[in-house]
Image: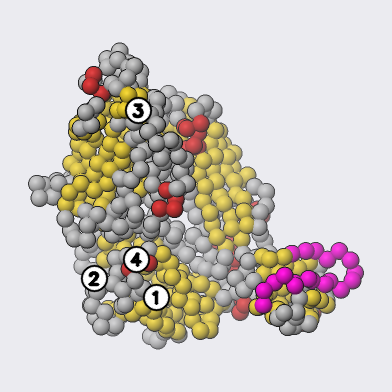
Amino acid sequence: MMKRFLAYLFFNLSFFIAGQAQILTPLESYPNSSNIYQRSRLSAVGDTLNLPFFDDFANQLNGAPNRSYWQRGGGAFINNQFGLNPPTVGVATLEGIRGNGLSYNTITAYGYTDTLTSKPLNLQNLRPLTDSVYLSFYWQAGGLAGSPDTYSEARPVFLALEFKQPNGSWQEVWRQAGANQVTNFQRENIPLLDPVYFYKGFQFRFRSSGVQKGSGDSWNLDYIYLNRKINPGKPLREDVAVNQRLNSLLNRYTAMPAWQYLANPAVELNDSAFTSINNLNNRFVPVTWRGYTKVISPAQPADTFLRGNAALSPLAPLFITGTPNPAALPNRLGNSFTVKSSFFINSRETSQRTRQNDTISRITEFKDYFAYDDGSAESNFSLDKTGQRLGAYAFETNIPDGVKGIRVYLTTTNVAGHQISFRVWDNDNGSPAANAKAQLGFNIPVVDSLNRFYDILFPAPVPVNGTFYVGWGLSSNVADFVNIGFDLNEVAPGKIQYNNNGAGWVKFTGERGALMLRPIMDRVTSAPEPVTSQTIVTVFPNPSTGQVYLRGPVTGWQVTDLTGKLILEDKVKTAAVPQLNLNFLADGLYFIHCHTKKGIVIKKISIRH
Ligand SMILES: [Ca+2]
Ligand SMILES: [Ca+2]
């Protein structure tokens, strides 16, 4: 695991995979997160902040910068996706995509792109030399989504820092030019020496310049701190922080159907949950930490699987890992369930702001689909631009199942109206079989509506067992790239294959990442705890107007809708025939999961008022 962690530090990205027609390209837009903008705490307009100024973008939802510290607008994207080994989780990414999620330009032009502007600060009672005021921050060229191009006059690719003077003009005080490489995060300490800056209303801003279409020339910022009495040779803050995403709770997927998990939990549950914590101080710091899982739907108490402690070395990260306890997760099929895994570090920090970076969590869903991706795209994946093309993605069931449909993430780098033919194949010796088992056409909707998952549902579930493939085909009429979201935070090695113009299936060995394509599985054909006889329980009357009786050795029951969402549950407390009052349900089909000593009998019931 440590090896994998270190590999992240330096690995370099190239978007065009030499010798292959399958390509990865930068995103041209992000999902519009303007709703999230509204959630950040508001300060009154015109507020002037007193020192210290601090933001490390930790534990903030993806979206716009926090308006308590930053001016509205400007397009910087706060996220936990694009930073490569940042000092603390969460970064601000500046590139060619606006705050509304769309590019600055529809053509490949160059110029200023995003701006991250502080709110006005009050520096009026400070003295330039004696107060030793510094702005310190960490920057990274590129990151997970690629590297900023090399600076030239025709292509001015750079990141700049500017200070605002009392007359309103901005002065550039620092600049880093693009050099076509991804860098590690580097810390800068910029002193405020000119007395002109020491007024009430001082602001600073970061600006990126580069390609105004998409995320090609991107920069990350982290841990921005402005204060007095700074000694640049000494530590920034007494701060220990989580600086790496938490891995999936599952071994080979990021999500899987509850019943497929329960068929083999020992294999599917990852035996290690890991993250990394970083000591930003230049002295040893004693810390304790805890790792826990918590089933959040349906809610259960948290289960602590790890406690640890160490004296953290100065200015160094420490990898921490533990083994989640399988017994803390549901062990029999009731409903779908959702588990939150978390690490919490305690370094006895006194500042609320530096404690925000002490926790990292991750949600793992056990619903009705398989996934290798984390749900957020960092790049586009496309097959070749012309000809007959097929793409396939391998999954594996533990018990026979059915593919109800395919969930696909389409990015806005697409042309509306093109038809994609989604398919399911059986496995033939490590590749998709010659003929698809199912095939369904789907037209790419208007581009403005993209950047999200679409569900393509087959008329009837397609039975699969063991290794199967879901994928897509493009006819030679579609002479364009058709881009599917590609997640660079997760990996699915060897799972993607392509077949161009009938030349045979080839494994995609290009960039590490996970294609955002998910098979939706069918709960009905795959009762995971089959009991010898489904007839030991009778549900009547069926159809029902609302009053339903269960006859048989039933100890408890749960009512769900067809998606597995829990509606009602209870235990049987008396010897009388259990009677369920389902009058409140809308007309439709539901499942009643009848618990017996021999297992669960699932009955479908039709409610008709
Ligand atoms: Ca901290
Ligand atoms: Ca992602």
SS for dot 2: loop
The tag earlier along the polypeptide, 2 or 1, is: 2
**What are the residue bounds of the magenta stretch?**
569-587
Which amino acid type is marked by label 4?
Asp
Give the residue number, with chain letter if any, for mark 1. 471
The tag earlier along the polypeptide, 4 or 1, is: 4
- Measured from the top left, where is residue 151 in percent x and y? 14, 46
The tag earlier along the polypeptide, 4 or 3, is: 3
Which of the 4 image quadrants contains residue 586? bottom right
Which of the 4 image quadrants contains residue 173? top left
- Measured from the top left, where is residue 597 in percent x and y? 79, 69
Closer to the camera in the image, 230 or 104: 104
Which amino acid type is marked by label 1?
Gly
Give the residue number, with chain letter if any, for mark 3. 121
Give the residue number, with chain letter if any, for mark 2. 21
Closer to the eye: label 1 or 3: 3
Contact (CB < 8 A) between labels 2 and 4?
A: no
Q: How many marks?
A: 4
Q: Residues within 10 Å of mark 2 (few under 14, many from 20)?
A: some
Residue at image coords 26%, 66%: 23
Give the residue number, with chain letter if any, for mark 4. 448
SS for dot 3: strand
Q: Is residue 515 visible?
A: no
In three-dimensional space, the C-alpha distance between marks 2 and 4, rounded to whole angstroms, equals 27 Å
Query: Is 357 part of what is drawn in magenta?
Result: no
